[in-house]
Image: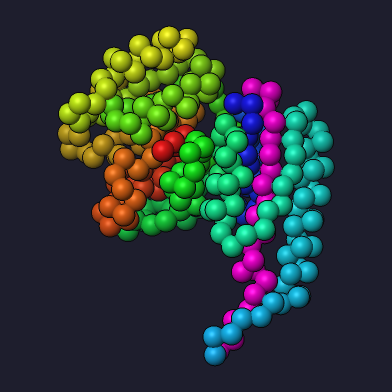
Amino acid sequence: MKTLTLHVAHDAGFTRRMETALDIARRFSSHLILVQPALAQDFVAFDMVGGAHFVAQAFEAAESARAKLKSQIEADLDNEGVSWSWQVIDGSSRVAILAEASRLSDLAILSLDPDRRGASQPGRSLAGDIAMTCRTPILAVPTGHTGFGFNRAVIAYDGGPEASFALRCAVPLLAACNDVILAQVSSEKDAFPETDAADYLARQGVQVRIEAITKAEHTVEEQLVGAAAQYGADFLVMGAYGHSRWREALFGGVTHYVLAETEVPVFLAH
């Protein structure tokens, strides 16, 4: 975890995700890359007949706001004792900008949507979209979460390729934890068993304890969110979108539910 990417924006979650990024950067002596998207549509107005034109006043206001935010953050970073750099990237898509900027990072740190909880229908989220767009793992941080701890981690493991990939990517964070719980989700045929995952982690110096999660009266996703709360997890590790995003959009799924309902940071890899 030597290179971290942090999404910079003037939103409700920024302070919390910056705290998280600094906690991780200090733990691993990481370099922090702050990425501030500059979206072209912020400076374009559309008229009633379908035309579009550049709005100079909007551009100047956005530039001024970005410069002010940058100045404030840099003043804070000067007292944090971490290595950092800054990128302002132009583009038309926040997802594309952040995904591209994260290509050579070990972890991208984003926020979960503040109004995500209790959504009756599957919806899109920045964290979910970026998890599907780039191969870099992401850490999705709830807007109300304070700091980032290394006491206990919970791994959602079903033996599938996404869960296995997320587990491998998370090894540095898991190795820093005092306690790691591998939550065994019902495996599909030909999946790698949880004992293989435990053996793999043991060879990485990570000792785990296996806890079975069965559907019973609750869904797997409900039990995963409950397990993270029950065990007092500092973060949850899981593979992103084991089914296609199209299927998730129509019917929902584990990833969508967890991103909508979790109260702890989620480490996602796809």
Provide residue 255's location: percent of width, then percent of height. 36, 43
Residue depicted at 34% across the width and 46% down the height: 257
Q: Is 121 placed left or right of 88 in the picture?
A: left
Q: Is residue 120 visible?
A: no
Q: Is 30 placed left or right of 168 in the picture?
A: right
Q: Is 241 placed left or right of 29 in the picture?
A: left
Which region shows up in magenta? 26-48
Q: Is residue 33 magenta?
A: yes
Q: Is residue 83 magenta?
A: no
Residue depicted at 74% across the width and 35% down the height: 84
Q: Is 22 placed left or right of 237 in the picture?
A: right
In this view, which residue lies farthest toward the bottom? 49
Residue depicted at 59% across the width and 52% down the height: 97
**44 shown above or below 203:** below
Quadrant of the rendered image containing residue 262 = top left
Provide residue 268's location: percent of width, then percent of height. 44, 37
Q: Quadrant of the N terminus?
A: top right
Provide residue 232's location: percent of width, then percent of height. 44, 27
**247 shown above or below 82:** below
Q: Quadrant of the C terminus?
A: top left
Report the front residue among 35 and 263: 35
Quadrant of the rendered image containing residue 229 = top left
